Image: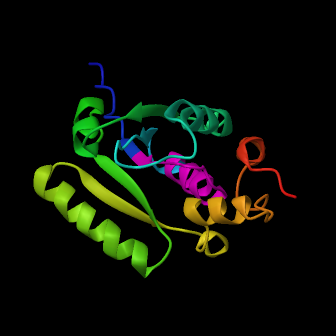
Amino acid sequence: MTKPAPHRRIAVYAGSFDPLTSGHLQLIERGARLYDRLILAVGSNPNKRYLFSTEQRVGMLESETRGIPGVEVLAFEGLLIDLCRRLEARVILRGLRASTDFDFEFNIGLANRDMAPEIETIFLLADPQHIFISSSLVKEIAFNGGDVSRYVPASVLDALDAIKPASG
């Protein structure tokens, strides 16, 4: 008698990743160890202005996660729970840096749970060295001439340098 194939554990980690930070990468690496497939869903909200196009954000994620087994990258629009259902993912992976993240994520997690009780939201705590790093902070520092090399991977640093206004 043949054993049935084990059920694959699929999680989705969604965000704008505008830009991708070292904190994001660290959560991706940890999430990839927990799940068979970790799908990085690059969100596109028509009401939000992005520094990088969806294609650029997907490309940076693909480049930086190429060597991490089980990680896939895709762009999406709409409700995250609808994407999870299409992908047969039963977990939404989210990162928490501070209590302000928790308040926001808690409300979204409750709404997702109400709409899709079969999909769990799992929170991973950021490493202390990444607690203060956010995409918004990286953009602010970069566009004011600061060094963000310790907050983002090299490919993102290059992309930021390419669009940063010249100083002087």
Looking at the picture, does residue 114 appear above or below residue 118?
below
Which corner quadrant holds the C terminus? Answer: bottom right
Q: Position of residue 69 (x, y in %)?
A: 58, 35
Left or right of residue 58, residue 88 in this image: left
Q: Nearer the viewer, residue 49 or 120?
A: 49
Q: Image point 60% across, 74% down: which residue? A: 132
Q: Nearer the viewer, residue 84 or 136?
A: 136
**Residue sitting at the far front:** 168
Q: Residue 56: name its quadrant.
A: top right
Q: Residue 78: name its quadrant.
A: top left
**Residue sitting at the far top:** 1
Q: Position of residue 161 (x, y in %)?
A: 78, 47
User: What colouring does the structure picture have?
Assistant: rainbow
**Residue sitting at the far bottom:** 99
Q: Image point 25% across, 30% down: which residue? A: 86
Q: Is residue 134 visible?
A: no
Which corner quadrant holds the N terminus? Answer: top left
Looking at the picture, does residue 67 appear above or below residue 31?
above
Q: Nearer the viewer, residue 6 or 104?
A: 104
Q: Image point 55% across, 56% down: which residue? A: 27
Left or right of residue 97, residue 14 in this image: left
The span picked out in magenta is: 13-32
Q: Nearer the viewer, residue 165 or 106?
A: 165
Q: Is residue 60 magenta?
A: no
Q: Position of residue 142 (x, y in %)?
A: 72, 59
Q: Position of residue 140 (x, y in %)?
A: 64, 64
Looking at the picture, does residue 124 appear above or below residue 120?
below
Q: Residue 148: name its quadrant.
A: bottom right
Q: Image point 42% across, 40% down: which residue? A: 41
Q: Is residue 9 visible?
A: yes
